[in-house]
Image (cartoon, rainbow, N blue to C red):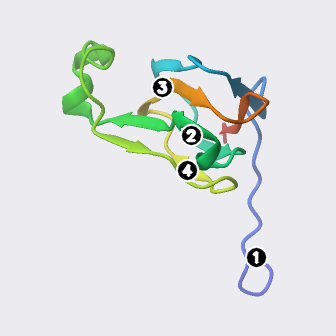
Amino acid sequence: MRGNATIVSAALADAEPAVNIYGVGGQFKPHEDKQRLTILVPLSDNAKYEGGGTAFWSEDARGPGRSRASTSAPTLVLQPPAGTALLFGGEVTHAARPVRLSTAHSPLPLHSFGHTS
């Protein structure tokens, strides 16, 4: 510890960081990252597309073994502004919601990090 700061050692998961790029219809099915910490950073302005966002399911809503996550409505959907980090535990069931319309000339990137230690 130096002053009031604690030095923390961290390691990224294999294949991280990653940039996922979603075009119209692009999505990522409900899943868990199985890391200690997941950090998602949207890189596109919400005004340039419709749909999208990150959906989350509570344990009750997803069902045992994620059995209902693909057929039940998510508990929460977030569409934060570009550059805003979403941080959550790697056991949380989440998905990238489908992009319905894009006014941008390029796909929508999302930067993600998985923290293993």
Residue 36 is labelled as 2
- Could you tell which of marks 2 and 4 lies nearer the N-terminus? 2
Q: Is residue 3 above or below residue 87?
A: below
Label 2 is placed on what type of residue?
Arg
Q: CA distance from mark 1 to mark 3?
A: 33 Å
Q: Is residue 67 visible?
A: yes
On residue 10, which mark appears? none
Please identify the quarter of the rendering in which residue 111 is found: top right
* Tag in front: 2 or 4: 4
Secondary element under disc 2, as helix, strand or loop, is: loop
Count neighbours of disc 3 (C-alpha within 10 A) and say few if under 14, some if 14 to 19, many if 20 or more.
some
**How far is the residue under mark 1 from the one under mark 2?**
23 Å
Residue 90 left/right relative to 6: left
Type of amino acid under label 3: Glu
Question: Is 79 on the left-hand or right-hand side of 1?
Answer: left
Alpha carbons under labels 2 and 4: distance apart:
10 Å
Task: Say which amino acid is labelled 1.
Answer: Met
Q: Earlier in the sequence, mark 3 or mark 4?
A: 3
